[in-house]
Image (cartoon, rainbow, N blue to C red):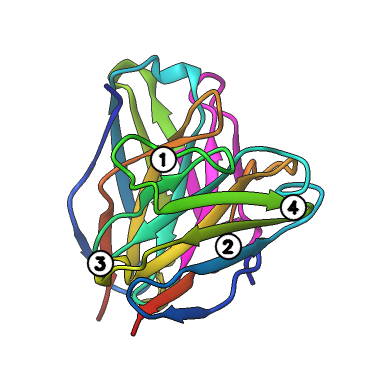
Amino acid sequence: QSALTQPASVSGSPGQSITISCTGSSSDVGTYKYVSWYQQHPAKAPKLMIYEISNRPSGVPDRFSGSKSGNTASLTISGLQADDEADYYCSSFTSTRARWVFGGGTKLTVL
Amino acid sequence: QVQLVQSGAEVKKPGASVKVSCKASGYTFTGYFLHWVRQAPGQGLEWMGWINPNSGGTYYAQRFQGRVSMTRDTSITTGYMELSSLRSDDTAVYYCAREDDDFNYDWGQGTLVTVSS
């Protein structure tokens, strides 16, 4: 059971927008700005897509955006493309001794 | 630039131990926590624990306590993760990751550990 809760799967058609939620607690998502999102294609290492809630690393398309409200962070992908089909993980700093927690991952299917 | 280079794939028998290394470069090794994360086939990312390379202090996820040991050798800027009493469900890719000042992470390339009789 992961510390952060994500939907197991989401889907959308090319060109559409989807949003993936990530629910934590006041020990992590609710209090800190250190929320990140990773994209992972099969047999590949996780790739950072969003950091500090809504910032994009260089090279990440602006179709990817992040936000937070209360204990829930969200990743929105607009203008879906076939290559967006992947697993997505949220993570956050936590004030517990662990310092770092993950969501269980969401499988995005592009129909 | 920060680089974390991990050791190569391992195949182990049930009950054995495995030790994965993570060679760090491009930053002050003792200045940043090093975490270990694993991913079993078809499963999600699972946080295992961290080591403070400066003090050697560690903290492990409860499910691994008693089986995992994270150490470091500051002279060669390398961190290690040793997992003992291996079972088939320990088959996974193991990653090291450096925590930076803003709680962002630089990842190693991953090490596949296969546990099979």
- Which chain is home to disc 1? B
| Residue occupying the point 64% across, 72% down | A1
The label nearer to you, 2 versus 3, is 3
Label 2, secondary structure: give it: loop
Q: Is residue B57 magenta?
A: yes
Res. B97 mark = 1
Answer with mark 4 or mark 3, whichever residue precedes in sequence: 4
What whole-number distance in Å separates the C-alpha atoms at marks 2 and 4?
17 Å
Q: Answer yes or no: do the residues labelled 1 and 4 have beta carbons within 8 Å?
A: no
Residue at mark 1 shares a chain with residue at mark 4: no
The label nearer to you, 2 versus 4, is 4
From the image, tell me which residue sits under label 3: A83
Q: Answer yes or no: do the residues labelled 3 and 1 have beta carbons within 8 Å?
A: no
Res. A69 mark = 4
| Of residues B73 and B110, the one drawn nearer to the viewer in this rendering | B110
Residue B68, image x, y percentages: 50, 53
What whole-number distance in Å separates the C-alpha atoms at marks 4 and 3?
28 Å
From the image, tell me which residue sits under label 2: A103
State which quadrant residue B107 falls in.
Answer: top left
Tell me the crowding category of disc 4: few under 14, some 14 to 19, or many 20 or more residues within 10 angstroms, Cα based: few
Question: Where B103 falls versus B18 (above or below)?
Answer: above
| Residue occupying the point 58% across, 62% down | A103
Question: Where A78 falls versus B56 (above or below)?
Answer: below
Q: Is residue A10 magenta?
A: no
Segment colored magenta: B44-70
